[in-house]
Image (spheres, grey):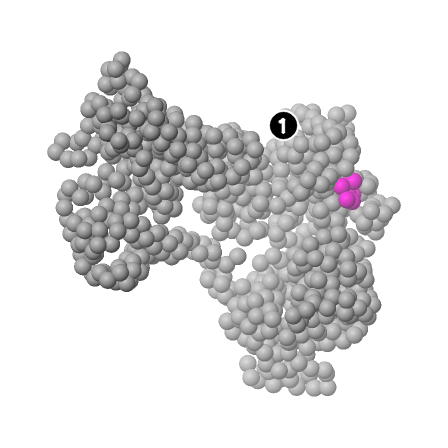
């Protein structure tokens, strides 16, 4: 073997400096395909479930298709359902950017609605309708933020994981609302039913002319745009992603880590509170035991489906809302209980998460 | 290929069959040709030194031999018989054992239990019988290890001996040692080489991977130098080569010696860093820094030596105010005209300073300095301009600023952080293992940068595992052992062995 140590390395394929852009494009393309594939996989498995229950899956799907997507009224129903899901989903997106897991959308939404209902209850007799509506918005956001703030405080002071506290606080929120509508806020006119007094017509969100779409839907879209801007275009959003990516690096860079975590969770809570407001003032008009049921959890799924990105979240919210709305026709068409669509929703989520997660290339 | 093989076979007539023979091994990862036409022959009863820079393909070669990767092309022979290990278990069955740099022992278990994990066994452990076998084997190979000791109570050197013993007891005849000396004190290195010599004398083959050239010359019978995935040099008796020859083979060109102009900086009465009785807890809640007194003066480079985990990390973090002291004081004086603040090279870049999904450019604003703003956001073009100036000034040639850090190798990550930190002026520089993952040329440049800071009047605190590096650049070397600062040695006239004794807790 040569002893000539200065021998030049013989020619060989030069390592390309970067293959990243091409690879990213590739994964983006296949990412969408996978999403569709996962959706189909979920539908196939659910079809087997339908078949096992003695119904024809093709008939069921055809029925769902015609009854939910081809009728304008039904499409509006989907949009109306999607709006609070999107807002509560943003309540997961923002904390997720900072590495926090907010499972408390359900409770923050309820507390937001309770605050809005309280504002309406006390101020309707004394203030102008517009002022009341404005204060309902503010009250819902502040209450949602405060509810999330409890979890934030526990995380920052006594270091309890926020996923646990936000989840537990959902029950506290639900039973607090039940306490109010079973007792002090119970509508005496609602015979035997436990609901709060229905909102005055002036406090119900106005709808866009000729449709059922209320302005709360626009609020959700604007909020998604605002969150997108804040996360991707502001210093605050950049800092959140530093904290979420590596909190130790953020600390060493001198970033105010505690403030960032706190603001992320508080803003999340405020967004979920707003979801409660539009659900109250745009959809249900009064608190009742099933108020806003599962919106917070579905929103959690929507956020995960969209990989915690605000604009795709809007689409994920629509998809999940469509599945939820299709539950009604499912019941009519096949005799399956409406809640069986939750199985479909779960299957789709599992398929999407399992199939579209970025794989570790090689450690 | 065939005629070559015939010629080689003819050349070996009368010699013992090679323990391991690797022919024309190639491996490609995506666009990177990690190994290209690599040959390696290890004869029984020899020590084969394998050297090369980071990224030269050493790890890839070893992983193919150990069955972790499958070669794209090429063949392997053990005792002359063709083999293709498909997993580490296959490799072990062939008598190939590997001692990884990050030792693969379970800290909570005893040495015997760890070895039991590696051995094929029945449903019962039979630890007592195993312990007897371990004692027997450890005497036979001169590897003093207590089978009943818990691994977490052992020093790094002892753990390494346990790991080697484990590999030997699983029947290895070819032992691959991956950078075994990088974490050891000089005395421990000597002890390790005693063991290696013993293995050789018993007819085993040893592959010693290292980047310390002196070690290759001392212990190896054969040397193979890899560069860019190819064998650049393969020779017997590495003692015949000078450091400069071997470096040239590794790097591909002559590397001029470090210009150590010790610019005399006028002494000042106030230190830039002053620790008095500094005591601090480590991450696990134990006392990791025990009453350390240390001053770093302007224009002084103080090296910190010690066996890994002796409190260096905590010392750096205390100096930077990142870790509170439980007693004692830390004072950072702003006594150098024109210089303020501190810059730091973190001990563990990936854990301490890297946000995987963010780009190089986005990392450049995470230095604690004011960030150029535009409206509500960051003025990224201004950051880009600032970064270009920094990169030019530092000269470590960072990866393109659009790359995400998660797509960079360890050495490239290190260059990003070094550029960001060492490119700024500061009165205090705290650099933990600054040359981690760097090639020879960039290591040299990093040392120059530290000396430039020193020449500008900054106080530099530099932690390194490499005593030679510290002796080359430091004015004084502070030696740590078990959280204590056991001695401060003037580099002029410093002696490796006495520093080594301090590192092991003895008296100089």
Q: Which one is nearer the viewer's eye here, A335 or B363?
A: A335
Identity of the residue furthest to the front in this view: A192
- Classified by dominant secondary structure, the portion drawn in magenta counts as strand
Image quadrant where residue A97 sits: top left
Q: Is residue B212 left or right of residue A191?
A: right
Camera sees residue A122: yes
Screen quadrant of the N terminus of chain B: bottom right
Identity of the residue furthest to the right in this view: B507
Depicted B311 relative to depicted B126: above or below: above
Image quadrant where residue A50 sits: bottom left
Q: Which one is nearer the viewer's eye here, A194 or B135?
A: A194
Say if the magenta span includes residue B478.
yes
Judge the density around disc 1: few (<14), some (14-19), many (≥20) Cα neighbours within 10 Å. Answer: some
Say if the magenta span includes residue B49.
no
Q: Position of residue B203 (x, y in %)?
A: 76, 76
Identify the residue shown where x is 48% and y is 33%.
Answer: A151
Q: Position of residue A135 (x, y in %)?
A: 31, 20
Identify the residue shown where x is 29% and y is 17%.
Answer: A123
Subunit that carries the residue with mark 1: B
Q: Position of residue B235 (x, y in %)?
A: 69, 70
Identify the residue shown where x is 33% and y is 29%.
Answer: A182
Depicted B268 relative to depicted A228: above or below: above
**What range is drawn magenta here?**
B476-484
Camera sees residue A224: no
Residue at numbered disc 1: B340
> What secondary structure is found at the residue carrying circle 1?
loop
Q: Is residue B488 left or right of residue B371?
A: right
Q: Which one is nearer the viewer's eye here, A30 or B338?
A: A30
Depicted B284 relative to depicted A266: above or below: below
Identify the residue shown where x is 54% and y is 44%.
Answer: B354
Q: Position of residue B277 (x, y in %)?
A: 78, 31
Q: Is residue A188 left or right of residue B477?
A: left
């Amino acid at each position: 073997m040569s002893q000539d140590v200065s021998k030049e390395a013989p020619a060989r394929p030069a390592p390309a400096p970067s293959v990243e852009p091409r690879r990213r494009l590739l994964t983006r393309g296949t990412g969408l395909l996978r999403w569709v594939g996962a959706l189909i996989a979920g539908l196939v498995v659910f079809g087997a479930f339908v078949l096992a229950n003695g119904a024809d899956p093709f008939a069921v799907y055809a029925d769902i298709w015609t009854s939910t997507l081809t009728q304008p009224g039904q499409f509006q129903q989907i949009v109306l359902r999607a709006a609070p899901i999107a807002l509560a989903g943003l309540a997961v997106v923002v904390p997720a950017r900072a590495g926090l897991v907010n499972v408390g959308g359900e409770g923050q939404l309820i507390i937001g609605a309770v605050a809005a209902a309280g504002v309406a209850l006390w101020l309707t007799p004394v203030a102008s309708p517009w002022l009341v509506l404005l204060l309902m918005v503010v009250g819902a956001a502040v209450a949602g933020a405060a509810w999330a703030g409890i979890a934030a405080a526990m995380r920052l002071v006594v270091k309890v994981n926020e996923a646990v506290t936000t989840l537990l606080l959902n029950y506290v929120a639900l039973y607090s609302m039940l306490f109010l509508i079973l007792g002090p806020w119970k509508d005496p006119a609602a015979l035997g039913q436990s609901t709060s007094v229905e909102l005055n017509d002036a406090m119900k969100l106005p709808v866009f002319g000729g449709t059922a779409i209320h302005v709360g839907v626009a609020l959700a879209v604007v909020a998604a745009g605002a969150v997108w801007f804040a996360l991707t275009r502001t210093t605050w959003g950049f800092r959140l992603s530093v904290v979420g990516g590596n909190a130790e690096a953020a600390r060493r860079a001198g970033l105010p880590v505690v403030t960032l975590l706190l603001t992320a969770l508080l803003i999340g809570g405020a967004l979920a509170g707003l979801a409660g407001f539009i659900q109250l003032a745009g959809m249900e008009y009064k608190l009742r035991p099933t108020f806003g049921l599962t919106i917070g959890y579905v929103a959690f799924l929507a956020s995960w489906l969209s990989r915690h990105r605000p604009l795709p979240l809007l689409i994920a919210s629509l998809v999940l809302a469509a599945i939820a709305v299709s539950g009604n026709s499912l019941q009519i068409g096949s005799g399956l209980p409406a809640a069986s669509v939750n199985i479909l929703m779960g299957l789709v989520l599992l398929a999407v998460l399992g199939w579209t997660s970025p794989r570790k290339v090689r450690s | 290929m065939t005629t070559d093989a015939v010629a080689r076979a003819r050349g070996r007539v009368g010699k013992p069959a090679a323990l391991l023979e690797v022919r024309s091994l190639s491996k490609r990862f995506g666009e990177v040709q990690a190994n290209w036409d690599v040959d390696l022959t290890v004869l029984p009863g020899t020590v084969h030194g394998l050297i090369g820079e980071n990224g030269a393909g050493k790890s890839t070669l070893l992983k193919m031999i150990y069955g972790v990767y499958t070669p794209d092309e090429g063949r392997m022979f053990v005792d002359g018989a063709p083999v293709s290990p498909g997993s580490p278990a296959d490799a072990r069955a062939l008598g190939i054992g590997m001692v990884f740099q990050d030792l693969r022992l379970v800290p909570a278990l005893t040495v015997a239990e760890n070895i039991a994990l590696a051995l094929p066994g029945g449903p019962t452990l039979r630890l007592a019988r195993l312990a007897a076998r371990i004692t027997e084997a450890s005497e036979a190979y001169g590897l003093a290890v207590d089978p009943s000791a818990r691994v977490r109570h052992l020093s790094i050197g002892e753990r390494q001996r346990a790991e080697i013993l484990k590999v030997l007891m699983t029947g290895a005849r070819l032992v691959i040692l991956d950078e075994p000396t990088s974490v050891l004190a000089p005395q421990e290195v000597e002890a390790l080489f005693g063991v290696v010599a013993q293995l050789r004398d018993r007819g085993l083959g040893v592959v010693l991977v290292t980047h310390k050239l002196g070690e290759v010359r001392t212990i190896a019978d054969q040397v193979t130098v890899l560069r860019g995935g190819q064998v650049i040099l393969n020779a017997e008796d590495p003692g015949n080569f000078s450091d400069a020859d071997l470096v040239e083979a590794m790097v591909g060109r002559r590397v001029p010696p470090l210009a150590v102009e010790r610019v005399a900086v006028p002494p000042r009465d106030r230190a830039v860093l002053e620790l008095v009785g500094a005591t601090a807890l480590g991450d696990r809640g134990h006392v990791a820094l025990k009453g350390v007194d240390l001053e770093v003066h302007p224009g002084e480079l103080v090296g910190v030596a010690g066996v890994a985990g002796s409190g260096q990390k905590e010392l750096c973090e205390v100096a930077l105010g990142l870790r509170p002291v439980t007693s004692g004081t830390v004072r950072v004086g702003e006594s150098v005209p024109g210089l303020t603040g501190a810059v730091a090279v973190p001990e563990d870049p990936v854990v301490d300073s890297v946000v995987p999904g963010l780009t190089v450019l986005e990392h450049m604003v995470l230095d604690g300095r004011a960030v150029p703003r535009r409206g509500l956001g960051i003025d990224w073009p201004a950051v880009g301009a600032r970064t270009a100036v920094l990169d030019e000034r530092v000269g470590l040639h960072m990866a393109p600023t659009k790359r995400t850090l998660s797509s960079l190798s360890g050495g490239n990550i290190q260059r990003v952080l070094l550029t960001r930190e060492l490119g700024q002026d500061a009165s205090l520089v705290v650099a933990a293992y600054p040359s981690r993952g760097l090639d020879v040329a960039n290591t040299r440049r990093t040392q120059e940068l530290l000396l430039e800071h020193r020449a500008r009047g900054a106080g530099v605190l530099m932690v390194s595992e490499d005593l030679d590096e510290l002796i080359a650049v430091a004015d004084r070397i502070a030696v740590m052992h078990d959280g204590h600062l056991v001695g401060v040695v003037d580099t002029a006239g410093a002696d490796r062995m006495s520093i080594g004794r301090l590192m092991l807790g003895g008296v100089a």
